[in-house]
């Protein structure tokens, strides 16, 4: 050990920016208030700095797991955000579609139906922005 310490917040902010993009993180940081500041620090430190930085799964696999969980829980805004992140992490639109199709069996057809609509809009927006 070199005496260096691992700061989960700094690592989390780095990964958060790599996965979600600087523009998204900058917007979230700009909306931070004294009321939400602790929550933003929590997700940066724990979700991004302690879980997304672990070596056990690559980012593509973490994206698949995240998309599935967000579909199952019907968290549509976060699902849209993580469709973008999944593209950043290397998933193709066809692979994202496969995740949604697989989720239809375990999470329900109505969830998958809405998931396809949300993902299609995100993918269209990303294509139009390119």
Image (cartoon, rainbow, N blue to C red):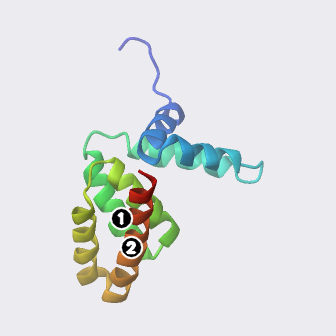
Screen quadrant of the N terminus? top left
Residue 67 can be seen in this image: yes
Q: Residue at x 29, y 73 (%)?
A: 100
Q: Nearer the viewer, residue 118 or 18?
A: 118
In the displayed structure, 57 sits above or below 82; it is above
> 77 or 47, which lies in front?
77
> At numbered mark 1, what does the secondary structure look like: helix, strand or loop?
helix
Q: Residue furthest top?
A: 2
Residue linked to disc 1: 67
Residue that appears at 26% across and 55% down: 91
Q: Secondary structure at mark 2?
A: helix
Residue 2 image offset from top left, x and y in percent: 38, 11
In the rendering, at what x and y percent does residue 126 appear? 42, 57
Kindly indicate the quadrant of the structure image that contains residue 108: bottom left
For residue 49, say whether it is visible: no
Q: Residue at x 46, y 44 (%)?
A: 48
35 sits left or right of 87 in the view = right
Q: Is residue 59 left or right of residue 9?
A: left
Mark 2 sits on what residue?
Answer: 71
Crowding near pointer 1: few (<14 within 10 Å), some, many (20+)?
many
| Crowd around label 2: few <14 · some 14–19 · many ≥20 (10 Å) | many
84 displayed left or right of 30: left
Q: Is residue 122 above or below residue 6?
A: below
Q: In the rendered structure, are the residues bearing label 2 and label 1 in contact, judged by CB atoms less than 8 Å apart?
A: yes
- Residue 99 in picture, x, y percent from top left: 25, 69
Return the x and y of residue 62 as percentages of the image width and height: 31, 53
**Could you say which disc has been placed on residue 36 in the image?**
none
């Amino acid at each position: 050990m070199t005496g260096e310490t691992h700061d989960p917040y700094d690592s989390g902010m780095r990964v958060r920016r790599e996965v979600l993009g600087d523009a998204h993180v900058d917007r979230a940081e700009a909306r931070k208030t004294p009321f939400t500041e602790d929550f933003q620090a929590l997700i940066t430190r724990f979700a991004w700095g302690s879980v997304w930085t672990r070596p056990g799964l690559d980012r593509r696999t973490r994206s698949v797991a995240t998309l599935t969980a967000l579909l199952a829980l019907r968290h549509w805004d976060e699902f849209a955000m993580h469709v973008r992140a999944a593209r950043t992490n290397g998933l193709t639109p066809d692979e994202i579609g496969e995740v949604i199709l697989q989720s239809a069996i375990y999470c329900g057809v109505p969830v998958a139906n809405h998931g396809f609509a949300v993902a299609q809009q995100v993918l269209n927006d990303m294509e139009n922005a390119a």
